[in-house]
Amino acid sequence: MKTQGVHRLALACAAALACGAVAAAGLKIQMPPETAALKVAPGSELAAGQCGTCHSADYVSTQPRDKPFAFWKAEVEKMRKVYGAPIADENITPLAEYLTKAYGKEQSK
């Protein structure tokens, strides 16, 4: 009986050490390669830098089409307020303008 307790303690210690080693090494997450790109237009570089930190270009391209500026501005503000996207105040309007022109009501066909 006593040896079972020692074995359990040894296993518990080994597991704790293994978990500590993983935590000390840091968790690394490898994102899959991007399979899409944002439409090239004035503001696309800003959008790639701001939007691409949180999601793929595919996410943008799957949003409803033909939406006006107000829709896209609300989407950008939602990304910041609800999801915590690091978007500065001065970038909200330029991002919404780009999204409206590239994907929204004003898109060139």
Image: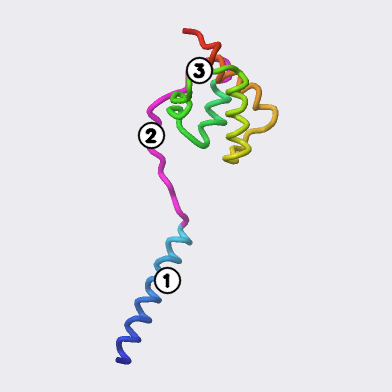
Question: Residue 57 location, x and y as percent?
Answer: 46, 27
Question: Is-magenta flag for residue 34?
Answer: yes
Task: Give, as a single range, the part of the protein colored magenta.
Answer: 26-43
The amino acid pointed to by label 2 is Pro
Crowdedness near tag 1: few (<14), some (14–19) or many (≥20) residues, C-alpha within 10 Å: few
Helix, strand or loop at mark 3:
helix
The residue where tag 2 is placed is: 33
Helix, strand or loop at mark 1:
helix
Question: Residue 74 location, x and y as percent?
Answer: 61, 27
Most foreground residue, 67 or 37: 67
Q: Return the disc, 3 or 2, that comes first in the chain's sequence.
A: 2
Question: Is-magenta flag for residue 71?
Answer: no
State which quadrant residue 21 falls in.
bottom left
Magenta: main secondary structure equals loop
Q: Which mark is residue 16?
A: 1
State which quadrant residue 87 falls in.
top right
> In 3D space, how far apart are the residues under numbered discs 3 and 2 (Cα atoms)?
23 Å
Helix, strand or loop at mark 2:
loop
Question: Residue 47 location, x and y as percent?
Answer: 55, 25
Q: Is residue 62 above or below residue 100?
A: below
The residue shown at (60%, 34%) is 78
The residue where tag 3 is placed is: 103
The residue shown at (40%, 44%) is 30
105 relative position to 87: left or right: left
